[in-house]
Image (cartoon, helix red, strand yellow):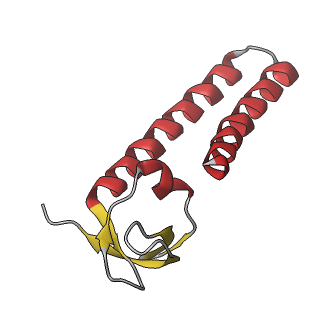
């Protein structure tokens, strides 16, 4: 839980620090608001994509073969490769590279 909180703080602190630097260095002019709007749009698009992925994909544990779903936060922050993600299995309690499985509609 502490790891997840630290990741969340870092995910919030880095953009806020960048925004603050940009505002102090260049002032609140048109370029700042264009950059801010693009940043917000990119963040919303990324959040929608991660939420869609978490709802449409499950994972199969490499040890016990249990199929399980994860939250969008875990989906975004877990180490991954194409088609695999390093996750903690709720069935056997072990961490392993879990295979991606498409959920049926």
Question: Looking at the image, which is closer to me, 3 or 104?
Answer: 3
Q: How many marks?
A: 0
Of all residues, the one furthest to the right in this rendering is 25
Residue 26 figure quarter: top right
Of all residues, the one furthest to the bottom in this rendering is 63
Q: Residue at the location (68% across, 38% down)? A: 9
Please state the horizontal and vertical placement of residue 85, each as a whole percent of the image: 48, 72
Of all residues, the one furthest to the top in this rendering is 28
Residue 11 figure quarter: top right
Is 46 situated above or below 105?
above
Relative to 25, 39 lies left or right: left
Q: Residue at the location (46% across, 57% down)? A: 75
Relative to 83, 69 lies left or right: left
Of all residues, the one furthest to the left in this rendering is 105
Please state the horizontal and vertical placement of residue 73, each as a whole percent of the image: 49, 49
Quarter in which the C terminus is drawn = bottom left
Q: Residue at the location (35% across, 57% down)? A: 53
Relative to 4, 61 lies left or right: left
Q: Residue at the location (39% across, 78% down)? A: 61
Is 43 situated above or below 1?
above
Please state the horizontal and vertical placement of residue 43, each as a whole percent of the image: 52, 38
Question: Looking at the image, which is closer to me, 84 or 62?
Answer: 62
Question: Looking at the image, which is closer to me, 55 or 63?
Answer: 63
Please state the horizontal and vertical placement of residue 20, each as a whole percent of the image: 78, 24
């Amino acid at each position: 839980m502490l790891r997840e909180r630290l990741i969340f703080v870092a995910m919030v602190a880095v953009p806020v620090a960048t925004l603050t630097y940009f505002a102090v260095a260049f002032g609140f002019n048109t370029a700042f608001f264009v950059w801010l709007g693009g940043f917000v749009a990119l963040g919303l698009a990324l959040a929608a994509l991660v939420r869609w992925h978490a709802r449409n994909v499950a994972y199969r544990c490499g040890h016990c073969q249990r199929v399980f779903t994860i939250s969008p936060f875990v989906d975004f922050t877990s180490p991954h490769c194409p088609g695999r993600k390093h996750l903690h299995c709720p069935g056997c309690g072990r961490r392993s590279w879990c295979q991606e499985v498409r959920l049926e509609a």
